Image (spheres, grey):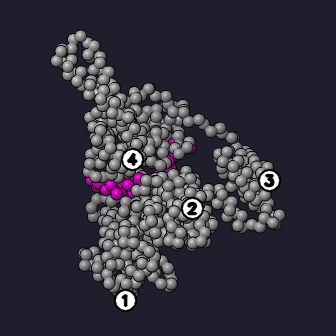
Amino acid sequence: MVRYSEELIEDIRANNDIVDVISQYVTLKRSGRSYFGLCPFHKEKTPSFSVSVDKQIFHCFGCGAGGNVIHFIQKIENIDFKESIELLAERAGIVLPTETGSSDDKKQRLKEKIYDINQQVAMFYHENLYKPTAKLGQEYVKKRKLDNKALKNFLIGYADSNNSVYKFLKEKGFTEEEILESRLVNKTEKGVFIDRYRNRLIFPIQDVRGRVVAFGGRVLDNSLPKYINSPENLVYNKSRTLYGLNVAKNSKKREMIMVEGYMDTVSLHQRGIDNVVASCGTALTEAQGRMLKKYCDKVIISYDSDTAGQNATLRGLEILKNLGCDVRILQMEGAKDPDEFVIKYGTGKFNLLIEKAISLIEFRVKVLKNNVNLDNANDKIKFLKEIAKILSTVDNKIEQEIYLVQIAETYNISKEAIYAEINKLNYNKNVGQKVLERPKVVKKVEKKIEPSNKREELIILLLLNGQMEIFNQIKQKISPQEFKVEVNKRIVETLYKKYEEEKQDITNVLDLFSEDEEAISMLTKIMSSNDEIKNDKKAVDDVINSYIKEKLTNRKNEIIYDLNNSNVSNFDSKELENELHDIIIKLAQIK
């Protein structure tokens, strides 16, 4: 039987957005950052079935069903794990490996070879940069003020003019077919092998898991084309790749800065702004937007001034907004791009620009204004109507009112006129349709949870943050054996083991409990809850201390009860008094 690799399963999961998949079976309504609907796994009248875009999980607060997109398909189609993988792979157009020797299996093996080739060539180019023959590359790097740490973090390298990649890869044992499939080398009609990249600074492009999937090569003089990028192949799909996301995903901020170029990304990271990514030469796609949404709630766009107002860019911003991101646009003057700005004015001023970034609505109005002459009556009417269209998309009435007042004052336009146009648009949109009142999302009333159980869940929520320092704080004070709820104990034991193996990436934590439905249900419940805990040491300590305090208090009450029991022997009484004394001291020490 064919076994699917973790990487392949993750690819399948990443290419099947949980909201899209579940929407084929359940009518979902958005509520905040989640979607709700009637649970397909039990009868109910009010929606208690929750789907999280951010976490790519579902959980029913009524029956407890939960999991990721693979679990959902298993449950809804009543099929096993392998069949669920196959169904979702087919949906995403992903070819699965079959029995050894088949064409599909050969294709999978070829993909793995290309990953290997890319990694080896990335290191080859990177090491080239430090050789005496790379003087041009070294001078360019110095001119662009890139330090050694940035070069190593992003594996930046140098391709000389020697056409040496083919020879290098042949010596490593790769076949001609594998080398040509990597698209790093071209073969002429005369059978001559020529490197794709020559006399260029090389930027390896890595996927979210850090695998090198492609390359960008920048010319070192004023010749054209300025950049040469890898064509798409078995491992590279540019519409599903974001440069720098493998590094930026580790940022503690829940926001991302989106720039246009490799150099902008590296330059900002070098200067301590670690939440920066770039699209790979395309306008933002929905697939890229979904990737971003997994790691942030806010996206700040910092594009070059000549592309910021283009229609393709605006469509990309709308994609992010529709995915539930808070979209902001950074306005930059005095420099053509973020790299030039931070070099000229410093990180502090760039951070100020981030703070002052305008909303998508404000940006669209600004772009609209640049394309009309408000001194012309026809243009002003057109401007007013377009503004009304923009504002009619704002669901929040308070937010809409604020924009209305702001725009009316800025452009000397009647607020009432804009409002009347918005009402007309809304009326026309609803003519002939039954206007449905948005259903209230009501979670099924659950039995009251014991405080200790709730605190156990908060401890698990902290562990799910994936930070080693938080784990160490918890481990010092709490043993898995202390958990009263059996399923919580199993979860914590597994998480402790994973941390101790120094595998901090718990993005796919549900995979650790593939055979434990109770654990999956508990985890999705915890992850779907609205509890938010800050990651700073004091907040974490407060949760831990609250847990310990309750545990000690419960034990203290048990001892007092036992001491009041006349059947306790003198020896046991003394032991209990000593334990009580220790507990009182410990309680006094907890702040």
Look at discs 2 and 3 and give the one toward the viewer.
Answer: 2
Which residue is situated farthest in the bottom direction here?
Answer: 190
- Identify the residue under disc 2: 353
Secondary structure of the residue carrying tag 1 is: loop
Q: Are marks 1 and 3 in contact (CB under 8 Å)?
A: no
Whole-angstrom CA distance, mark 1 to mark 2, is 54 Å
Whole-angstrom CA distance, mark 2 to mark 4, is 29 Å
Q: Are marks 1 and 2 in contact (CB under 8 Å)?
A: no
Which residue is rendered at x = 28% and y = 41% of the image? 476
In this orientation, does residue 249 appear? yes
Q: Of the residues under marks 2 and 4, which one precedes in the sequence?
A: 2
- Identify the residue under disc 1: 190
Q: Position of residue 398 (x, y in %)?
A: 67, 45
Q: Of the residues under marks 1 and 2, which one precedes in the sequence?
A: 1
**Which residues lie in the magenta part?**
1-30
Mark 1, Cα crowd under 10 Å, few <14 / some 14-19 / many 20+, is few
Residue 131 lies in what quarter of the image?
A: bottom left
- Identify the residue under disc 3: 414
Q: Position of residue 260 (x, y in %)?
A: 52, 68
Amino acid type at circle 3 is Ser
Secondary structure of the residue carrying tag 4 is: loop
Whole-angstrom CA distance, mark 4 to mark 1, is 57 Å
- Identify the residue under disc 4: 465
In this orientation, does residue 548 appear? no
Amino acid type at circle 4 is Asn
- Name the quadrant of the C terminus: top left
Q: Position of residue 157 (x, y in %)?
A: 37, 75
